[in-house]
Amino acid sequence: MINWLSENWGNILVIAVLLLAVSAVVFFRVRAHRAGRGGCGGCAGCAMKDICHEKHKKN
């Protein structure tokens, strides 16, 4: 097992960094969505704004 880890430490490191980056992007996108900020730059000219913010209109 230690032999396998020593042979593949570079791959393991790259995969760990990629997983960390993807997790950070997903975390911040979910956080922004929950805060009401869209990912497309604004809702003023968006054709989907009524569907995207439907739950806010009901309140």
Image (cartoon, rainbow, N blue to C red):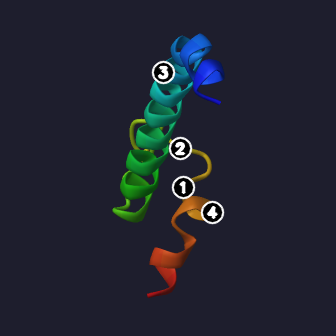
Residue type at mark 1 is Lys
- Few, some or many residues within 10 Å of mark 3 (<14, 14–19, 20+): few
Residue in the picture at 61% in, 11% down: 7
Residue toward you, 12 or 47: 12
Residue toward you, 32 or 22: 22
User: Which residue, given by chain and number where applicable, does mark 1 sit on?
Assistant: 49
The quadrant of the rendering that contains the C terminus is bottom left
For marks 1 and 3 on the same chain, the one whose residue lies earlier in the sequence: 3
Residue 22 left/right relative to 3? left
Residue in the picture at 44% in, 35% down: 20
User: Which residue, given by chain and number where applicable, does mark 4 sit on?
Assistant: 51
- Which of the 4 quarters of the picture holds residue 36? bottom left
Residue 25, horizontal then vertical, whole percent: 44, 38
State yes or no: discs 2 and 1 in contact (Cβ < 8 Å). Answer: yes
- Few, some or many residues within 10 Å of mark 4 (<14, 14–19, 20+): few
For marks 4 and 3 on the same chain, the one whose residue lies earlier in the sequence: 3
Say which mark, if any, is on residue 46: 2
Mark 1 element type: helix
Q: CA distance from mark 2 to mark 1?
A: 6 Å
Residue toward you, 42 or 39: 39
Q: Nearer the viewer, mark 3 or mark 2?
A: 3
Q: CA distance from mark 4 to mark 3?
A: 41 Å
Residue 52, horizontal then vertical, whole percent: 57, 60
Mark 4 element type: helix
State yes or no: discs 4 and 3 in contact (Cβ < 8 Å). Answer: no
Residue 49 left/right relative to 33? right
Say which mark, if any, is on residue 13: 3
